[in-house]
Image (cartoon, grey):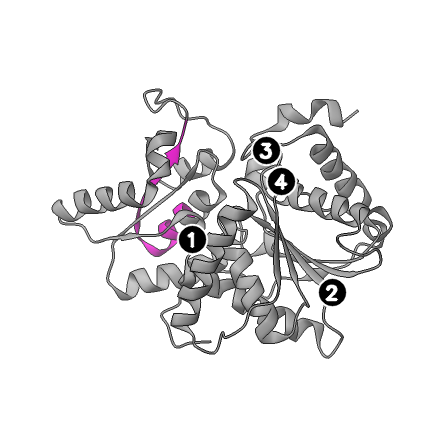
Amino acid sequence: MPDLPRIRIALTPTQIVKRPHLDALLGVDLWIKRDDATGGAEAGNKVRKLEWLLGDAMSREADTIITCGGLQSNHARATALCCAALGLGCVLLLRVDDPANTQLPLTGNVLIDRIAGAEIRFVSREEYARRAKVMEGVAAELRAAGRRPYVVPEGGSNGRGSLGYVECMREVAEQAGTGRPFDVAVVACGSGGTAAGVALGAARHGVAKRVHAMAVCDDSAYFDGVVARILAEARALDPKLADAAPLVIDDRFKGPAYAVSTPAQRQTMVRVARAGGIVLDPVYTGKAMHGLARAVERGDIARGSRVLFIHTGGLPGLLAQGDAFESELA
């Protein structure tokens, strides 16, 4: 890896686990990388990215981190907790339908954001569409007040953040030893950085022949552009990252909207929990696992394939949506 600032936050290496009953349920040779266990309440894929992003921030003597996400953002929660651990201030811009309604829920990620002491500001959907400029505006405001802000992009998804998943694939290669590569690595895709890092790392370390990223919002054309940008940024930081594994971004199973799941997706989540003790979330991993199941049914991923599923966490998001599961729990 390049000699760049990094702060060790994640509890790694995370395990790769086997649940034989899930093989029968899904029709593949499934292995699960437990990146839902990269820490305590901050756990999930975002922590690997924040190691590099907050390392850069602290090398620049920043004292406040600015970032953004949906109201129940896993990334915002992880950032808030990591900032608290490092003694950094944290400003979260959270997307809501009505910014004039200042009532914050005491559930899920938002509850943890508040416990961690993050400053929460609501932004409208229109403002979120130009989130980079909005965050730079907040940074200018903080600089005028004598503070030293550092902006972390949505999901920690830029070239620097993606290095966390290049490193994760090196970790997988060490755990897998000299065995044959996985036929495919499957991961949820919400802001593109994890998928980009997995594709770069899978090629660099011989982990998987290809990567299947399950979009949880937007569409494949949008993510093609986002991932291309992140790949270019990562290669500029580490010229050894010349190639990426073939990457398919699948937008057919994203559900009605970001953070909104279908009954079929929730049913898959319940089946996976009951067959293998693996708890998924309705925003990211539940959609990704459901997409994997459907991709096998459609023949996009061959039955019997050796599959690495990257569990990116998100438990607090599940706990904020308990009522949606009532009909699936009979």
Task: Kindly identify the residue that appears in the image at 66 percent across and 62 percent down.
Answer: 15
Q: Are marks 4 and 1 in contact (CB under 8 Å)?
A: no
User: For mark 2, what is the residue?
Assistant: 183
**Three-letter amino acid code of the residue under disc 4:** Asp
Residue extent of the magenta highlight: 80-96
The span from disc 4 to disc 1 (Cα, nearest Å) is 19 Å
- Disc 4 versus disc 3: nearer the observer: 4
Q: Which residue is mark 3?
A: 319
Q: Which is closer to the viewer, label 2 or label 1?
A: 2
Q: Secondary structure at mark 4?
A: loop
Q: Amino acid at mark 1?
A: Gly
Separation of residues labelled 3 and 2 (CA atoms): 33 Å
Residue, disc 4 = 281
Image position, residue 60 (x, y; %) = 25, 64
The dot on residue 156 is 1
Residue that protrudes farthest toward the front in the picture: 221
Sooner in the amino-acid sequence: mark 4 or mark 1: 1
Mark closer to the chain start, 4 or 3: 4
56 w.r.t. 324: above or below: below
